Image: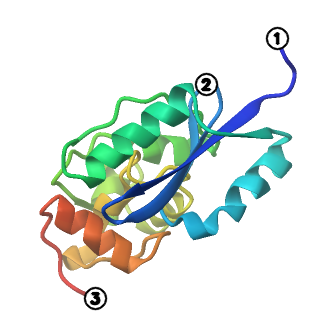
Amino acid sequence: MDSIVNLHVIEFDHPLGRSLVAATGRGVRLVILDAGRAGEVAELARDEGLEVAEGGQGPAFRAARQLREYFEGRRRSFNVPLDLRGTDFQMQVWRTLRQVGFGRAVTYGELARRVGRDGASRAVGNACGANPVPVIVPCHRVLASGRRLGGFSSGLDVKKRLLDLESVAYEPT
């Protein structure tokens, strides 16, 4: 097997803007909702010794197609392999987040309880903020107490648009 792992990258347009997906042959590693932050791909590749290959194949192509369908309102869940890196706690939070279905939301406190760490809502929030594949791992579905928006790595405007797309009720900040 080739010792260099390629990171396949696809940029694509959708109703909310322009996004980017990066994936290895094993699965999706990165979703950037604002293609203007494309420098993060180069940073990931450099940090992990990956070679960037423009144009997608396999998981990158599949993820870009499914994300476009989601943004167009034609998809509610994702069926793509993931190649995530994180701490055991982050991985546990991200797995649990994938169980929060389309059109639903949980609070940081509720998510902390679901991962068996009652009272660790701040740590859960940090894990959500470190999520490299937003939307596929739906960290936008996590709200602060009182169903307030809380934070989002791609900005609160994007979080609002995603929640509105899914008709999730929330309290403005």
Q: Nearer the viewer, residue 99 or 11?
A: 11
Q: Nearer the viewer, residue 82 or 118?
A: 82
Query: Which circle, 3 or 1, is nearer the viewer?
Result: 1
Disc 3/disc 1 C-alpha distance (Å): 51 Å
Q: Is residue 1 above or below residue 32?
A: above
| Residue type marked 1 | Met
Of mark 2 and mark 3, the one earlier in the sequence is 2
Of mark 1 and mark 2, the one earlier in the sequence is 1
Please name the residue that numbered disc 2 is placed on: 26
Local crowd size for mark 3, using a 10 Å CA cut-off: few (<14), some (14–19), many (≥20): few
Q: Is residue 165 above or below residue 4?
A: below
Please name the residue that numbered disc 3 is placed on: 173
> In percent of the image, x 58 and y 35: which residue is there?
56
| Residue type marked 3 | Thr
Please name the residue that numbered disc 1 is placed on: 1
Do callouts 1 and 2 mark residues in contact (Cβ within 8 Å)? no
> In percent of the image, x 37 and y 78: which residue is there?
156
Disc 1/disc 2 C-alpha distance (Å): 13 Å
Q: Quadrant of the C terminus?
A: bottom left
Secondary structure under the numbered disc 2 in the rendered image: loop
Q: Is residue 152 left or right of residue 48?
A: left
